[in-house]
Image (cartoon, helix red, strand yellow):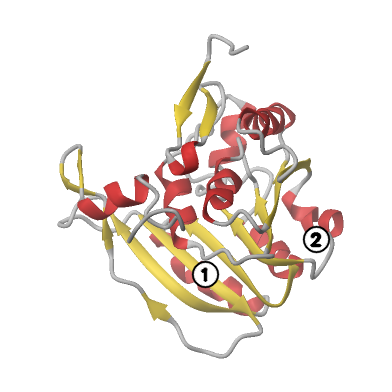
């Protein structure tokens, strides 16, 4: 049963649906962009740090059914929502959601145990703006419980040799992302900038690095979200429709 603050949205990929709760931080474009950007391989062991309502593991499962997925979430009420979303899609045996602090992720989940770590972490640094009065929204938006360095450090510790770490974040912190990746043994390998409109500055960056890899960065073509106000570009519409799915004819 849904509460008055909840609704069910279509994710479209493989017919998945998701319960969104306005009391918490709802999934946004960032999650879909990261899921489209990430390459999931059969038998990958995947963990999503700060999984929220579980949107990213759901979308990645749609891309690759033969990988295993774990979502780590600190806030108890949000964790329960993620579990409810797995059950809503009959994926409770495919995606495991666990309560835990990102700062202790490698201790909780096992060092070197994963081949792919993904995260849509809080973007705002403490002191950089207003903090939401909602503990759940504050945790999702602001680095109250974990910093960008915590995410990269623990992501690197969770990865096996050759494993990949993929993040969605703000371009203003791209230099920091690169610096932290190198600090913790992750070589930046793929990068994509997202522009709201063609004549605007990018407002989202997608970055992927590989543990103990050789140098060599591939910069993908830019992605423009809107061709005009409230009108999505052809590529953005294709992403929403699950262009990356195996069942979709390219």
Residue ID at (66%, 30%): 78
The crowd level at tag 1 (other Cα within 10 Å; few <14, some 14-19, many 20+) is: many
Q: What is the quadrant of the N terminus in the image?
A: top right
Q: Secondary structure at mark 1?
A: strand
Residue 63, image x, y percentages: 52, 55
Residue ID at (45%, 61%): 37
Q: Relative to the observer, which residue lies in front, 6 or 197?
A: 6
Residue annotated with mark 2: 106
Is 177 on the left or on the right of 81, as rendered? left
Q: Earlier in the sequence, mark 2 or mark 1?
A: 2
Residue 62, image x, y percentages: 53, 49
Q: Is residue 192 above or below residue 215?
A: above
Is 40 on the left or on the right of 115, as rendered? left
Residue annotated with mark 1: 208
Q: Relative to the observer, which residue lies in front, 2 or 243?
A: 243
Q: Is residue 36 above or below residue 23?
A: below
Q: Is residue 24 above or below residue 243?
A: above
Is 137 on the left or on the right of 76, as rendered? left
Q: Quadrant of residue 224 in the image? A: bottom left
Residue 14, image x, y percentages: 48, 42
Residue ID at (25%, 58%): 201
Q: Quadrant of residue 54 in the image? A: top right
Q: Quadrant of residue 157 in the image? A: bottom right
Q: CA distance from mark 2 to mark 1?
A: 19 Å
Residue ID at (26%, 55%): 235
Q: Relative to the observer, which residue lies in front, 138 or 40?
A: 40
In the displayed image of the protein, which residue is found farthest to the top? 4
Q: What is the quadrant of the C terminus in the image?
A: bottom left
| Tag 2 and tag 1, C-beta contact below 8 Å | no
Q: Secondary structure at mark 2?
A: helix
């Amino acid at each position: 049963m849904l509460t008055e603050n909840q609704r069910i949205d279509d994710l479209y990929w493989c017919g998945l649906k998701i319960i969104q709760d306005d009391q918490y931080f709802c999934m946004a474009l960032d999650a879909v962009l990261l899921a489209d950007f990430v390459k999931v391989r059969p038998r990958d062991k995947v963990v999503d740090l700060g999984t929220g309502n579980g949107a990213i593991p759901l979308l990645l499962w749609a891309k690759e059914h033969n990988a295993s997925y774990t979502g780590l979430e600190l806030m108890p009420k949000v964790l329960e929502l993620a579990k409810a979303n797995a059950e809503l899609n009959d994926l409770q045996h495919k995606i495991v959601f666990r309560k835990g602090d990102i700062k202790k992720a490698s201790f909780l989940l096992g060092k070197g145990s994963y081949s792919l770590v993904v995260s849509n972490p809080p973007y705002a640094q403490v002191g950089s703006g207003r903090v939401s009065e909602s503990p759940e929204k504050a945790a999702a938006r602001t680095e109250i419980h974990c910093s960008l360095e915590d995410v990269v450090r623990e992501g690197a510790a969770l990865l096996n040799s050759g494993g990949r770490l993929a993040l969605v974040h703000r371009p203003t912190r791209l230099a920091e992302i690169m610096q932290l990746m190198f600090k913790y043994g992750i070589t930046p390998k793929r990068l994509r900038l997202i522009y709201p409109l063609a004549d605007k500055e990018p407002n989202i960056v997608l970055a992927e690095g590989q543990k103990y890899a050789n140098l060599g960065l591939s910069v993908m073509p830019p992605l423009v979200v809107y061709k005009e106000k409230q009108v999505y570009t052809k590529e953005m519409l294709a992403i929403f429709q699950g262009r990356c799915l195996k069942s979709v004819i390219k």
